[in-house]
Amino acid sequence: MSPDQPQRFEDICSAAIHSIHDEGSLHSHAIPIYATSTFVFDSAEQGMNRFAATEPGYIYSRFANPTTTAAEKLIAALEAFGLKDAGGAALQLKALLHASGQGALSTLCFSLLKSGDIILTNIALYGGTHEFFAYLLAGLGIQTLFIDLSDLDAVEQALRQHPQIRLIHIESPTNPLMGCTDIAAVCKLAVPYGVKVSVDNTFATPYLQQPFALGVDFVYHSTTKFLNGHGTAIGGVLVGKDTDFMNTTATKTFKLLGANANAFDAFLLINGIKTLPLRMRQHSSNAQHVAEWLEAHPAVAKVNYNGLKAHPDYALSARQMRYPGAVLSFELAGGIAAGKQFINRLRMCTRAVSLGTVDTLISHPASMSHAIMKPEERLKAGITDGLIRMSVGIEAVEDILADLEQALSGLPV
């Protein structure tokens, strides 16, 4: 095989490490940090050509930067790994790296939707997404219907009754109850209506779930979480299979919003992704052990983890995900008072919001990640005052369980 031909990898572990390389003249082993705001032209003609998009090259880091481009290519390669397009060729995707997941969501919505359009989405969503839809987009005349996307009859009924629906947005698994949506089935329903489907793949990552294999049009991530893996940088990415749309309308919106990532955060992201498959296997293995242990604990009233047979989406999760993932939530029998006591007793597990870092993070959704939702909206989404969320890390599972045991001891049963 010629060195100029793309390498075909047998496993996504290799793709996470070798899908990109330094395209500069010095051939750095690691992707360099191009810490520059602007780029030099060899001539006036070259500058004119780059602005006219008749010649490839960089202009200004708000538009594109070699480090962020490398991260975009890497994530696109992982989301497309092993997939084919309608013609049987390797699936080509386009990614745009943003300063945050909310930035990526903004580019998706502002490039696709206009006043009068409707988004169809799930009742249970990340709090920031819910507020973005219910507050910011609503103020611009873009409405959102919040339904149970696991009810396929309800999805089809909504599509029939509301021809203004332009986008179905899926979060699977959901935050923090780990509910799963049948992505392929929803995509099949959307096609006759010309409705686009997007999936928030933050919890799953391309290693655990590949939504493009199930028929979606867009995937986005908060790269802050598992893709980075170490809690060192904020970021987000939007990935699309309509490369013409992504290279034109979406890219123009992306540039005008000014939501671009910076080179240093992209560098950290690239290096985090190199260990993504290894980390996700350990995260998932630990989470399975923790969920089963919590399920048997007398102080725990309920565990929400899609790797448990008692979870309503256990079979669906097993069908469309490689492993159930790292996040779970549980209800303490003693409610909010027990929850506070439990969190304050933790010795090793980290009291913090967010998720996806190598250490175990524990938070209280009702007062933290979902505090911006109205109480009645939280309860409708299944987020009670006594709910605890865990992003299970890659520590020795024995140490995680020991910390949970001492923190739970003496709580009401």
Image (cartoon, helix red, strand yellow):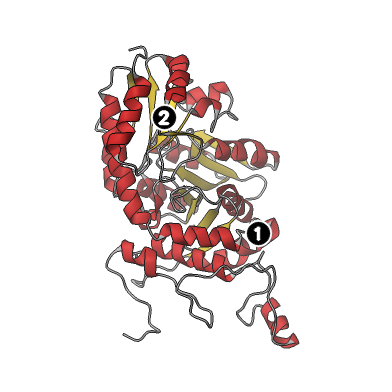
The quarter of the rendered structure image containing the N terminus is: bottom left
Counting from the top left corner in percent of width and height, residue 291 is at 30, 32
The quarter of the rendered structure image containing the C terminus is: top left
Q: Which mark is residue 163?
A: none
Vertical placement of residue 404 versus 7, above or below: above
Q: CA distance from mark 1 to mark 2?
A: 45 Å
The residue positioned 45% from the left and 47% from the top of the image is: 202
Vertical placement of residue 106 versus 340, above or below: below
Residue identified by numbered label 2 = 347
Dot 1 crowding, Cα within 10 Å, few <14, some 14–19, many 20+? some
- Could you tell whether 44 is left or right of 126 in the image? right
The mark total stands at: 2
Residue identified by numbered label 1 = 253
Counting from the top left corner in percent of width and height, residue 20 is at 44, 71
Front tag of 1 and 2? 2
Which amino acid type is shown beneath numbered disc 1?
A: Thr
Q: Secondary structure at mark 1?
A: helix
Vertical placement of residue 191 versus 404, above or below: below
Q: Secondary structure at mark 2?
A: loop
The residue positioned 40% from the left and 46% from the top of the image is: 358
- Residue 390 visible: yes
Foreground pick, 88 / 359: 359
Counting from the top left corner in percent of width and height, residue 59 is at 68, 74
In terms of sequence position, does the residue under pointer 1 or pointer 2 come before the other? Answer: 1
- Residue 313 visible: no
Q: Residue furthest top?
A: 412
Q: State the image quarter where residue 271 is shown.
A: bottom left
Counting from the top left corner in percent of width and height, residue 338 is at 43, 16
Foreground pick, 230 / 188: 230
| Residues at discs 1 and 2 in contact (Cβ within 8 Å) | no
Which amino acid type is shown beneath numbered disc 2?
A: Arg
Foreground pick, 308 / 338: 338
